Structures are given as C-alpha cells and as structure tokens.
Amino acid sequence: MALNLRFKDKVAIVTGGCKGIGRGCVDIFVENGGKVAVFDIDDSIGETMKPEGPGEVFYIHCDMTKEEQIKAAVEATVAKYQKIDCLVNNAGWHPPPRTIDGFSSEEFRQLLDLNLIGYFLTCKFALPYIRQTKGSVVNISSGAFTVGQPESVTYVATKGGIVGMTRALATDEGKHGVRVNSISPGCVWTPLFEEWAKTVDKKVMDDIKDISILFQILRRFADPREIGMACLFLAADATFTTGEDISCTAGIERGYGLKMQ
Ligand code: NAD
C-alpha cells in the first residue's frame, strides 16, 4: 500500500476499468485512497472487483458506444460521490491487422464510436463537474499513433484523434483550471494485447515476446500498473502540465530498430 496517499478522497472515473490498462489505473488510484467509478461492460468482473487499498470501487455497467448510458453513468457517479476529480478515458479496441483494403467504412465508424466518440461523450458529460473541482482528464491514446503502426490504419486514426482532441480540449478548459492530457502506451501485456498478438503474422513474430526486444528499448512489456502510475502522476502531481501527451513506450521511438516490414 502507498505510504503517501496521493489521491485520498478524490473521485475518478475510469472507463474500461475491469481489465488491462484500465484495471491498472483503478488499482493505483484505490491504493492511493481514491474512489473510482468504473464504467465497463464486463459485469462478471465489475460486480466482484475488490482492489486492495484504502479507496473503493463503484462499478457501473456502461457501454461506451451508447450515449445515454454514458450520460447516466456520469450522473450515477455524481449522485454517489457528489464530485468528479479525474476522468480516465481508456475503453478501446484494436482490430486485427490488415491494410486499408480490408476495412469497411462501417467497421471504421464502429471503431470511432468506441475509441474516439466515447471519449468525447464522457468528457462532454463529466467536464461540468470536473470544472467545479478544477480536476483533470487523462485520455489513453497509443504509441501506435506516434510510430504509425503497420496494418492498423483505423486504429491509428482513432488514437491520433484522441491526441488532437486532448490538445483542443486543454486549450478550451484551461480557463476553468481543468487540465487535459493524454498517455500513449507502448506494448502493455493485457487481454487485448494477447488477443491481438494471436492475429499478427507469424513470419513477422514467431514469438510475441520478441516485440519487446526489437522495439522497446527497456526490452520488456509494460505492466498495466505502470500506466496507472503515469495516470496518477498526471491526475495528482503534474499540476502545471496540460495539453501534453506522455509517452509510456519504453523508448519505442528511439534508436535504430528492425522494422516490421
Ligand atoms: P483490454 O481489452 O485488455 O481491456 C479493455 C477494457 O475495456 C475491458 O475491461 C473491457 O471489458 C472494456 N470495454 C471494452 N469495450 C467496452 C465498451 N464498449 N464499453 C465499456 N467498456 C468496454 O484493453 P487494454 O489493452 O487494456 O487497452 C485499454 C486502452 O489502452 C485502449 O484504449 C487501447 O487502445 C489502449 N492501448 C493499449 C495498449 C496495449 O499494449 N495493451 C497499448 C497502447 C494503447
């Protein structure tokens, strides 16, 4: 347990907080005394989650592609805790790899609904409350945007949209004392990554562990908790930082690396 409770009695929303990176954020906030509303669709996990720490979790079933559910979930959070200090937009998906020829416009629209418009809507409904606390928003983008990940055109487009939206929102919200930042993680070992890795061309990477050796100069995957710690830094400590994207990629952009194609 953290000795110095950096999020004591603060209230956060974490979308997609049942598993993976979102769960890492929930655990870190709860360990630091935070009260965390988790918006997710995995009820079997959500209704039984008991992270360790002095904080607490409030699970709300919320499909992040459904505007009315997002609005209701934000209202339920405020009804329970009377305030929102931080919103972590995280719920997202990565389609299996293919070039643009293999994507339909309808698939792209569905991905936009989750990866970008879901973030937009949660901001829209939560910001009136975040302004009252002079709190912050943390949007999870991806290092895939920075590097232009191959065979991921729709995913990369949504993640670039998140960074752009973060900058524009930061510009608008500064007058309210609200900070808006994003985090671009590299390879984080999560259920999503595990599923995606199974779909990647075997001739490119026979052993998925090779990715971390070839591209991330710390030569390992991130644990979801490490992204959670970056979230806590932005929410609790980085009080003069807004409109920024923090790269948590273990240096994937540095040095000379073998390319995937
Ligand atoms: P994950 O699939 O392991 O976990 C995603 C969580 O979101 C799950 O709890 C799931 O139930 C929930 N979710 C999915 N669809 C939802 C919906 N419609 N409404 C509400 N909740 C929903 O994913 P992850 O790997 O933890 O990724 C989380 C975020 O981080 C995504 O935005 C992803 O693009 C981004 N990201 C991941 C990595 C990585 O290496 N894992 C790298 C960069 C960015």
Image (spheres, rainbow, N blue to C red):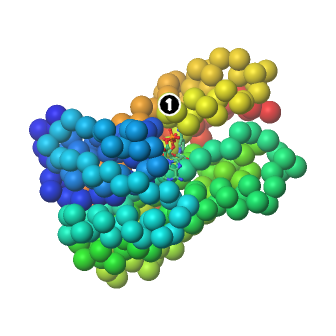
**Which one is in front, 256 or 91?**
91
Instruction: Decide if residue 260 is in sight here.
Output: yes
The outermost residue toward the right is 101
Q: Residues within 10 Å of mark 1 (few under 14, many from 20)?
A: some
Instruction: Decide if residue 229 is in sight here.
Output: no
Q: For residue 85, which quarter of the picture?
A: bottom left
Q: Residue at x 44, y 74 (%)?
A: 124
Judge whether 55 appears above or below 109 on screen.
above
The x, y position of residue 192, in whole percent, is 56, 37
Report the residue marked by disc 1.
189
Q: For residue 241, which quarter of the picture?
A: bottom left
Q: Which residue is drawn at 36% across and 67% down?
A: 74
Q: Residue at x 52, y 24 (%)?
A: 219
SS for callout 1: loop
Total numbered labels:
1
Q: Is residue 163 left or right of residue 77?
A: right
